[in-house]
Image: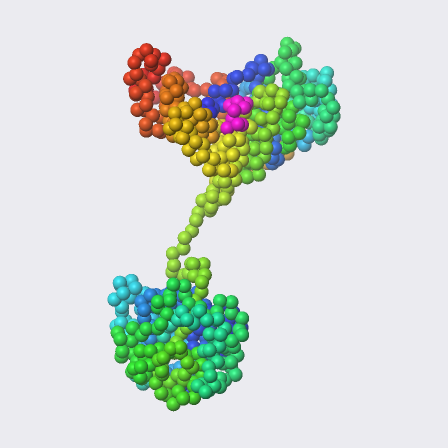
Amino acid sequence: MEAGPAAEANGHAPYGGAHVVAFVNEKGGVAKTTSCVNLAAALAAEGRRVLCMDLDPQANATTAFAVSADQAVEREAHCLLTMPRYPLERAIVATQIPGLDLVPSSPRLGDCNKALVMEMGREGRLRSKLRDFYRSVLTEKYDYILVDCPPSLDMLTVNALAAATHMVVPVTTKFYALKGMALLGEMVATLHEQIGAWVKLLGILITMYDKNTALDVTLYRLLKERIEREYGDYIFSTIITRSVVVSEAEAGGIPAVIREPESPAAAAYRALAREVVARLGDSALGAPAPVHAQAAAR
Amino acid sequence: MDMQPEPSACSPEAHPDCSVLITITTPGSETPICRFGSARDILGGITVRQLIERVSSRQSVLSAGVPSAQLEAESTTASAVRELIAARSAEVLLASDNGGGGQAVDLEAAVSTIAERHTGEAGSSFISISLEVRPLQDAAAPAGRERREVMNPPAVEVAPRPPAAERAFAPERPRSSGWALIPGDEERSQPIALGEASHPRLEPGPPPAAAQEPREVAQPPAVERASGAPAVSEPPARPAAPVAGELVTIVAEGEPEIEAQPPQQGERKEYIRKSDWLRAQFLPEVEALDFSGLFVGNLGLGVREQASRRVAVLADPSRITEILLQGNSYRRSGDHAKALICYQELVDIDAANPDFRYLLGKTFLELGQLQEAAEAFVRAKELGHEGAQNELDQLNRRPRRRSGILSFLRFWR
């Protein structure tokens, strides 16, 4: 219990060292999609190769990267999950951001819950596709695969958690969001017990935080005290505050990190990217300054 | 205190929540001037309730003089009474703040000022006003009946009341609490005229008996008192005709919900910060949530079992004491193996408790498992247990052949 997530982050390397991070919370409206999209953009801006997978039938992440509906219908996560021989590389489309690709979604993705009911190994469809993808010598490899999950604990979320190496739980400082996080915990424990999932909690991300609201401050402190006392340092030190810049960027097809790079929200997501990379044990970002730099600073 | 001049506004039905009755009867009027108010009304910077309590606690009755001629005009009467009570309350405050020594000179000056302001001259006849706490026997009787005795005295003793007074003091009025005594004020139920001794010059008009024995006057003038004879002081108070200089009593009705009073002007209000209130609201809710499933991948499935035990203890806090006592019992009886199970369970329930770690280490020590004991003591020491270091020192001082496996502990010394 003393160990934090950074110490355990490198326990699994099922995809050749790539990190598959699912953004998941049973509660909707906690900035799962916004965090996933902006973090992906921030990582790509740092020179990382990033794949964003939109597993939400609302397809908000697809919209955020301005991928057209035609592309989404032709290549989308629905095919990836329902068609056994549909490879991952066929579902990938490029975005306007260099180094950032997308597996788009469409409302048709919601049918997966029904389509997969009678399928064998339905929980591990995405996991097997990712394994095949990384085993292939012909495909481009990504450093990070960020999965945007729907706000429900359905088969899409199960597939995401079964495939992911880590999960980030965005949560607002509202009590219902905390309850949703507890419900998610039940599901994660079941996945570990039943299907041998290997997903680990990378961190709890506080979003839409308003430091001037007593409720936000109180619930944040209560949650932080509780988690740190019982489990360890699992709450990201980066806090995403409520920002209109992020909302304005939703319709522009470009995440706020790229569209408004000078905004506080963009700075927060860049800080989150550094923290994520550090927690994942990647030395390229978020690493301590070199020795000579420290000496120069002194 | 609502001191509206219209007598008709004194109807109890018009003031169902009133608890203070002020009755003033003037020589020139057959109808008593009565006023209803609430103990929460503010007079002179404090509430009427506080004023009454302060006066009662000093076992005194306020009385002073106001020119009776001035009372003939009702509006002026109301103003005079208000000012008088304000002056009295100020005096009580001063007396209380100065250790009970009283401020007779100030009071006298205040009343004289009031009198001169209303009459233009000091002296002539005065009417006294007093505060009274109702006796206990009055409270023990049914409220309506007690009031009926006061308001409907025998016909041979009192004159028929005017219709207006009957309407005002009808016994069947809907009063919820009745005329009750202030809780805990039984010993000071009888009005004692201590205040008059300190400033007798304030009552030049009335006879001395009237000044020293204030009576409750809630009735129109009785026949035999109409001539201006001195008031009779025997309790219970009977309706009597107030004359110039006679006491008029302000009757306070006790309110059992005295603690429920909201803070009044001038009182210190206690506030709670919103964040503290929110924390108190949400702390049990957040503590009851089970997040352990999120950490199964990081900490193993055992975290779930630990959380379930924690939830069980939250639901029944007595269980942790039960386990502790059982473990201690096993340990005293020499059954260290069973004691170990109990202490291990306590550690699983509350891993951050240094005492449980220490007990676990002691039990390991008694079982001869020195390495496990050392680990438990080290953890207890990290958690702040004061005796853990001593146990570690003793472990390190053991003979080498027994403590060879503990050689790594030497750096803790």
Q: Residue at x 74, y 24 (%)?
A: A118
B409 and A245: which is toward the camera: B409
Residue B124: x and y in percent read 31, 85
As for residue A133 lying within the magenta part, the answer is no
* Any part of residue B71 in sight: yes
Is residue B298 within the magenta segment? Answer: yes
> In the current view of this chain or complex, which residue is farthest to the front?
B333
Q: Quadrant of residue B238?
A: bottom left
The residue nearer to you, when weighing B200 against B403, is: B403
Which residue is nearer to you in this view: A284 or A123?
A123
- State whether residue A224 is above or below residue B88: above
Relative horizontal placement of residue B105, taking residue A137 as reference (left or right): left
Residue B306 x %, y %: 50, 28
B236 sits left or right of A188 in the view:
left
What residue do we see at 45% from left, 81% from top?
Answer: B219
Most common secondary structure along the magenta stretch: helix
Residue B57, image x, y percentages: 33, 65
Q: Which contiguous range is marked in magenta? A: B297-306
Q: Residue at x 60, y 35 (%)?
A: A27
Residue at (51%, 31%) from the top-left corner?
A: B309
Of residues A141 and B341, the one drawn nearer to the viewer in this rendering:
B341
